[in-house]
Image (cartoon, grey):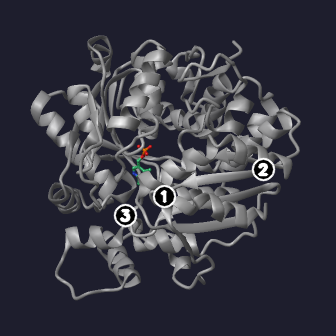
Amino acid sequence: MNILYKSTRGDSSRVTSSNAILKGLAKDGGLYVPTELPYIDIPFKNMIPMDYKEIAFYIINKFFTDFDDSTLKNCIDNAYDDKFSSNLIAPLKNIDNNYFLELYHGPTLAFKDMALSILPHLLKASCKNLNIEKEVVILTATSGDTGKAALEGFNNVDKTKIIVFYPKKGVSPIQEKQMITQDGKNTYVIGIDGNFDDAQRGVKEIFSDKKFNDLLSKENYMLSSANSINIGRLVPQIVYYVNSYIQLLKNRDIKENEKINIVVPTGNFGNILAAFYAKKIGLPINKLICASNENNVLCDFINTGIYDIRREFKLTSSPSMDILVSSNLERLIYALSDDNSCLINSLMKELEVHGVYEINEDMRNNLNDFYADFATEEETSLSINEVYKNFNYVIDTHTSVAYCVYKKYRQKTNDCTKTIIASTASPFKFPESVVESIDNNYDVLSDFQLIDKLSNISNIEIPKPIKELKNKTIIHGSICKKDKMKSMITNILNV
Ligand SMILES: *Cc1c(COP(=O)(O)O)cnc(C)c1O
């Protein structure tokens, strides 16, 4: 089956996966989705002997059909190597019969590494597939974790430059330090005086600015995106859900074809959308449980059918989920509407103009796969404490939001389907919130003292990337106003 990609906003062109990966966003501002979905066509038990890379090849190959086998295998080999501190890549921990899917063993200690360690290789291969000689400029807006993972992924990849915009006041100190100490001669990091939504909007505007793109093209540049709107990020994320199902099967925790639930701490709706696609291609999933923090716009949407961003933007202890405009939701509502791009266009217009839209009855009925709730700051902190006290297992704030929402779900539904909890960051990335939740009986400590303390509490060695961070020099210090992002790029590229 040869799979092409189309825009959610109705542009009639159909493009190859290479094209979709390279462009990031479709010309009409929509997101690329596959024109049809493949299907897992071998029994799950036959996958038991397969390792992460083999499962990755099996899944990604079904979506990116214009990559030849050896190219794709190369991309996978280069991505999932010893950059990951676990040779399982994404190990599953059974804690009191909850399955924590640890997606944070990559170089930047957050789940973004799962996709961003392969995206640069997919991008380079896409250029080759399409005979494109231009230098690719990756533009990225980050709520904290994407930025570092993208910088790390693209660091010194030839014929690419990467420019990251982050909300100067909206990321954790460790996240900021990780980014502004990034080496590599093709990396640029800029703080903006706005929040993540401002950064994301700015980047999207630049992508759809035809004049600016023409200018860049003349100078032999082309823009691409490392944000989760890129289909090249979404598809590799399907892999770890399939892989974790196989791990459960292998450990005899489930029977073949037994359904599972998946809980995902959600921000831009990329991670949970990958789980939704996993279900669509045949992974036996019962409920997809969407966990929000106090920025609970998605939770409200799933429960009411109304997406309403006219509310206060809150800075929480789970900053990577501090998002009101979830880009990937567009792919979900497109699917809910049975690919009705006219409808999606008008909903997106309403969101832009009025800050709110409501989906119709049919679309709401299609939301049955989902369940949603949110965790307050206090609940998040208490859950970190509870998991530590009861099971001697330390989770970060984002994972705690997921765990908390799952507890609420169990209480309300009594559903005891085996459940995977996507664990999206290492607790060492958010040492202050985590230590405070476990034992707030200390004087003010610096971040690195907190990290030492966390290592003592958890009896886990400090992950190498964090240890090394302490003595790294700050390389990037640019700051810009949120409406000056384009001129920053002009300066960097000298166009
Ligand atoms: C990005 C991120 C999330 C949110 O994932 P989305 O795909 O944007 O929904 C959750 N937790 C952590 C730690 C993240 O970095």
Report the residue marked by disc 2.
216
Report the residue marked by disc 3.
427
Label pair 2/1, CB-CB below 8 angstroms: no
Which of the two discs, 1 and 3, sits closer to the camera? 1
Which of the two discs, 2 and 3, sits closer to the camera? 2
Category of crowding for the residue at label 1, using alpha-carbon neighbours closer than 10 angstroms: few (below 14), some (14–19), many (at least 20): many
Q: Is residue 373 above or below residue 417?
A: below
Category of crowding for the residue at label 3, using alpha-carbon neighbours closer than 10 angstroms: few (below 14), some (14–19), many (at least 20): many
- Looking at the rendered structure, the kind of residue marked 3 is Pro
- Looking at the rendered structure, the kind of residue marked 1 is Asp
Category of crowding for the residue at label 2, using alpha-carbon neighbours closer than 10 angstroms: few (below 14), some (14–19), many (at least 20): some
In-image side of 158 versus 468 (left or right): right
Report the residue marked by disc 1.
145
- Looking at the rendered structure, the kind of residue marked 2 is Leu
Q: Quadrant of the C terminus?
A: bottom right
Q: How many angstroms separate mark 1 from mark 3 (CA)? A: 13 Å
Point out which mark residue 252 bears. none
Q: Nearer the viewer, residue 184 or 222?
A: 222
Q: Position of residue 337 (x, y in %)?
A: 40, 15
Earlier residue among tags 1 and 3: 1
Q: How many angstroms separate mark 2 from mark 3 (CA)? A: 41 Å
Question: What residue do we see at 40% from left, 59% from top?
Answer: 195
Q: Position of residue 409 (x, y in %)?
A: 17, 35
Q: Is residue 290 visible?
A: yes
Q: How many angstroms separate mark 2 from mark 1 (CA)? A: 28 Å
Q: How many marks?
A: 3
Q: Is residue 326 above or below residue 152?
A: above
